[in-house]
Image (cartoon, rainbow, N blue to C red):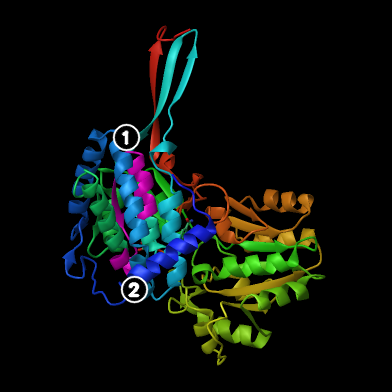
Amino acid sequence: MATYSESDIRKIVEAIVRNTAGAASSASYTSTTYNGRSLIGIYEDMNEAIDAAEQGYRAVRAMTVEQREKIITEIRRLTVAEAAIMAEMGVAETGMGRVDHKKAKHLLVAEKTPGTEDIVSEAKTGDNGLTLTEMAPFGVVGAITPSTNPSETVICNSIGMIAAGNGVVFNPHPNAICVSNYAVDLVNRASYAAGGPKVLVCSMVKPTLDSAKIMQTHPKIRLLVCTGGPGVVKAVLSSGKKAIGAGAGNPPVIVDDTADIAKAGKDIIDGCSFDNNLPCIAEKEVFAFRNIADRLIEEMQKNGAYLINREQADKLAGIVLEEKVNKAGKTVKSVSRTCVGRDARVLLEKIGVKVGSEIRCIICETDFMHDFVQHELMMPILPIVRVDNIAEAIDLAVKAEHGNRHTAHMHSKNIDNLSAFAKAVETTIFVKNAPSYAGIGFGGEGHTTFTIAGPTGEGITSARSFTRKRRCVLSENFRII
Ligand code: NAD
């Protein structure tokens, strides 16, 4: 695979914008059509979708690895070519995120999601002969995908799952069904163009909790892969099937007084405002040493952050969080779906503040118990809590992460402090001195994924996460030494 630098990616994005800008905004689409063309692989009934995905699985099993890789290459090519369409569609359909950033996310998926090279066999030889361990497919995978990175997750999951030799049926988020099904169709078009089956992966016309339930209990589904909030992760982990759960986070950031404060201020705002804070890895709250907090806030303001006071923060919290009575009869707060992923400018308007589009993030000073610290907002709102020392910073940051063990960030040049936080917080991703997205390969080393499986331990998932190990023992012989 070629590797692109961030400036290459920017150039590609600009080229795509020139070629396809406005393509989706002027298009007509539903969950089964795009500009009048029927999308391939979309079914009314989950049972039918699973049967079709099983046919896809049989076709993949019959292929050589080279043929699978050809399909994956074509998926990558179409994803780059149609990134702008999916980015515009994703924002238009969900009302969340930013078109340019969604384009960049699709390019990242196309470029840095591992393919068949991720599937590696092991051989052990000794006095008793040869033992071979191979990574085999599960069969048909049932995948549940979120509204926050909808088509990105469908394509990323498809590449990894097909590379591993599986079939896939998706039950996407209902609020992002058009763009998710566009991505399912893209994978099927790529398959057909590269000599594979016409229907390789499948999805639903109208996904519901009932269709998810059919998926979770269907005997042909051998593996469930769920990317979403705590509710859905709990549901698949209770299904009795092998499940990979990629759940919620609330990533804290610590900035100590050895950090490069100008860089920390810029990196934090870059990461926190990326796709309006929709990525689960994005910076959600900051714990800043008291002696550098003023400078950090100034640097953030130089980089598109707008500082609101405590009264304004409380007013905004009353708007972006809604009180609901849960099943146990308890009043709980949850994020307002009409505020998640919205531009900072739009959120500020709700409290009567008018700013230009150069403002990409709202910052405010709060105490630790403030709702902005405690809730995973998925909005470009960043609370900053002053701390006296590293012990206090780590204690509060670990508590704010709520035991998700998902992602944490730190800006520091003190190796002892960095190590102490990394050990204490135990997250799947720990990013030092960079924006959060470096943790998924954007300006950081390593492959990408949009399914970060903390609860079930697969971590930064890739093709090998969707395999089962099988052993073949050749007793006594077949060594060459
Ligand atoms: P969500 O939890 O509302 O929905 C995720 C998916 O689960 C959707 O397809 C939804 O229809 C389905 N779903 C919800 N409840 C279900 C149930 N009981 N049974 C079956 N299906 C159910 O999530 P969202 O708002 O789209 O995404 C945001 C959440 O997902 C955040 O908490 C974010 O941190 C998390 N997320 C995690 C990762 C990761 O890799 N760990 C990636 C993206 C998003």
Which residue sits at x=69%, y=48%?
423
Residue 78 percent location from the top left of the image: 32, 56
Residue 184 percent location from the top left of the image: 28, 56
**Farthest residue, direction bottom:** 352
Q: CA distance from mark 1 to mark 2?
A: 36 Å
Asked whether the residues under the numbered discs 1 and 2 touch, taking CB atoms below 8 Å apart as contact, a structural biologist would say: no
Residue 310 percent location from the top left of the image: 67, 84
Q: Nearer the viewer, residue 97 or 12?
A: 12
Ligand number 1: quarter of image: bottom left
Amino acid type, label 1:
Val
Secondary structure mainly formed by the magenta segment: helix
Is label 1 or label 2 in front? 1
Crowdedness near tag 1: few (<14), some (14–19) or many (≥20) residues, C-alpha within 10 Å: some
Q: Which residue is mark 1?
A: 65
Amino acid type, label 2:
Glu
Q: Is residue 173 magenta?
A: yes
Query: Range of the magenta residues?
Result: 155-179
Q: Nearer the viewer, residue 74 or 229?
A: 74
The disc placed on residue 104 is none
The quarter of the displayed image where residue 160 is located: top left
The disc placed on residue 93 is 2
Query: Can the viewer see residue 238 in this picture?
Result: no
| Residue 296 relative to residue 72: left or right | right
The quarter of the displayed image where residue 240 is located: top left
Which residue sits at x=19%, y=58%?
43
Residue 238 percent location from the top left of the image: 40, 50
Label 2: which secondary element: helix
| Residue 152 relative to residue 251: left or right | left
Quick one: label 1 or label 2, which is nearer the N terminus? Answer: 1
Which residue sits at x=36%, y=61%?
151
The quarter of the displayed image where residue 165 is located: top left
Q: Is residue 295 magenta?
A: no
